[in-house]
Image (cartoon, rainbow, N blue to C red):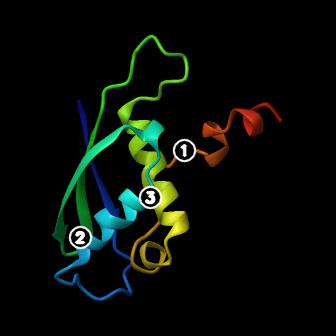
Amino acid sequence: MDCVYTSLRRRPEVSPATAGEVAEVVGILWAHTTPKDGLEHISGSLDSDRVDLLLYFLSSEPTSPAAHGPLHRAAALLTRGHQASPALKRRYLPPAGAPCPQADDPQRAKA
């Protein structure tokens, strides 16, 4: 199992955290995960300007040519969730260092 520590930074104009914010972020990420992510568990905590997350992934098979490492999978999941969720877009800045969405699509990567 691989563990990735990451954060979503709150937009400066957004008010401080609410009691259910971590649960809402975790739920949004679970709603946008895919089987190829290999996500097993998410935990989180609040800070004044961000939500901190621990993402636990199944270790990928190192000999698989299509396998992405845990950092790539975490960045892809955060980006996917942020792009799809109005709540995350309103409350948080886009994830830093996110992979290009076409990188996960072999058909688009060849074009």
Location of mark 3 (residue):
95
Q: Name the quadrant of the N terminus.
A: top left
Q: Residue at 47% across / 37% down in the picture?
A: 36
Kind of residue sitting beneath label 1: Pro
Q: Quadrant of the C terminus?
A: top right
Kind of residue at badge 2: Ala
Q: Secondary structure at mark 2?
A: helix
Residue placed at 43% from the left, 78% from the top?
87
Provide the secondary structure element on which disc 3 rests: loop
Residue occupying image coordinates x 54% and y 44%: 99
Determine whether 90 is above or below 4 in the image: below
x, y (%) of residue 100? 61, 45
Using the image, tell me which numbered label, if any, was put on residue 76.
none
Q: In the image, 105: left or right of 7?
A: right
Q: Are marks 3 and 2 in contact (CB under 8 Å)?
A: no
Mark 1 in CB contact with mark 2 (< 8 angstroms): no
The mark found on residue 23 in the picture is: 2
Judged left or right of residue 21, residue 96 is right
Q: CA distance from mark 1 to mark 2?
A: 25 Å
Query: Which tag, 3 or 2, sits closer to the chain's start?
Result: 2
Left-right relation of 105 to 65 = right
Check if mark 1's residue and mark 3's residue have beta carbons within 8 Å. Answer: no
Label 1 sits on residue? 99
Residue nearest the viewer, comparing 12 with 35: 35
Residue 86 vertical placement versus 28 (above, below): below
In the figure, residue 31 lies in which quadrant? bottom left
Instruction: Give x and y (percent) for residue 34.
Output: 47, 46
Q: Residues within 10 Å of mark 3 (few under 14, many from 20)?
A: many
Q: Nearer the viewer, mark 1 or mark 2?
A: 2
Query: Residue type at mark 3?
Result: Pro
Image point (32%, 68%), residue name: 25
